[in-house]
Amino acid sequence: MSRVAAVDCGTNSIRLLVADVDPVTGELNELDRRMTIVRLGQGVDQTGRLAPEALQRTFAACREYAAVIKDLGAERVRFVATSATRDAENREEFAAGVLEILGTPPRVISGDLEAEYSFTGATKELTGRTDLATPYLVVDIGGGSTEFVVGADRVLAARSVDVGCVRMTERHLVHGGVVTDPPTAEQIAAIRGDVEAALDRAAEVVPFSQASTLVGLAGSVTTVAAIALGLEAYDSAAIHHARIPYERVREVTELLLRSDHEERAAIPVLHPGRVDVIAAGAVVLLAVMDRIGAREVVVSEHDILDGIAWHAALDEE
């Protein structure tokens, strides 16, 4: 069994998992899992660069994580950076800071590899379940991009497209540096149009019609699930593998779209860092379910972070 530390640095959040992993038995024992909203992708869609304040927030989180990794004695550290970093002109500044703090360079992975990691993390525990038909369609809604993966015991097809909750919010809901609250019908339609076009691009590679079970991951999906379940506090155990019907996803999405900042902030399970971007994330999820005709989404708390840990334990790319 190997003790590994996996770091997933996305557009909106940076997350850490330290775990003991046994690739032979398929066992993953979680020692520490945490998330920090750093909004690394702040303004990247408009400027093409990582903002100085976003870098400083991210480096501060890295220093916190470095202390945890040292205390727990992880033998191997794998740092993966995704959408925002792929797009940034000054990504070398980011890479140098991560290397200095954590002693390992960030691996800026392709969308296809991001999809493979997400699939591994989300479906490893589902192997052998008779109540969920395969192939799975795994949908990972991030801050800057969304990954679509179809597979059963392995990935059959995958595509990453540039529609995520942060990117859609900044592109369509921000005017003069302020998020429109609540969004107008025209703004919602603009987000939906972008998502539909992205789904068209994904469908060129990913056979949506072959999928039997929709598995949703990442913060937008888990937050929608928490609201749909009526939780008074965020409860990972209650959310993990919850099956949320289409109608509840639609109702939660409509609630978020008609709410202003204060009303969303008052939702007990909504992390403060997601208040301004959750509505766009919910629109992405609902559009996916509409496109494939999904009657429910199976929600996974295990995602790309767990996939990174598995690949680190095997010392694979």
Image (cartoon, rainbow, N blue to C red):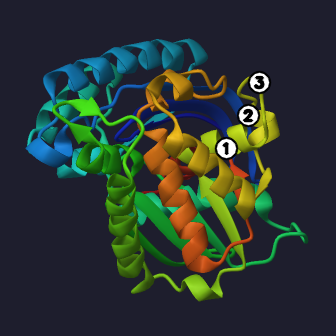
Q: Mark 3 and mark 2: span between their CA atoms?
A: 12 Å
* Residue at 32 percent of width and 32 percent of height: 104
**Label number found at residue 236:** 2
Residue that label 1 marks:
301
Instruction: State the image coordinates of residue 42 (x, y, percent, origin top left).
Output: 24, 34
Label 3 packing within 10 angstroms: few (<14), some (14-19), many (20+)? few
Residue that label 3 marks:
232
Counting labels gives 3
Q: Amino acid at mark 1?
A: Glu
Residue that lies at the very extreme toward the right in this rendered image: 130
Q: Amino acid at mark 3?
A: Glu
Horizontal arrangement in the rendering, residue 44 relative to residue 256 (left or right)? left
* Residue at 19 percent of width and 30 percent of height: 177
Label 2 packing within 10 angstroms: few (<14), some (14-19), many (20+)? some
Horizontal arrangement in the rendering, residue 82 relative to residue 223 (left or right)? left
The quadrant the N terminus occupies is top right
Marks 1/2 in contact by CB < 8 Å: the verdict is yes
Identify whether 300 is placed above or below 213. Answer: above
* Residue at 35 percent of width and 68 percent of height: 193
Instruction: Please indicate, yes or no, whether residue 297 appears anywhere in the rendered image.
Output: no
Instruction: Please indicate, yes or no, whether residue 169 appears anywhere in the rendered image.
Output: yes
Instruction: State the image coordinates of residue 317 (x, y, percent, origin top left).
Output: 42, 57
Q: Amino acid at mark 2?
A: Ser
Horizontal arrangement in the rendering, residue 317 relative to residue 294 (left or right)? left
Give the foreground label among 3 and 2.
Answer: 3
Q: Nearer the viewer, residue 286 or 166?
A: 286
* Residue at 53 percent of width and 71 percent of height: 149
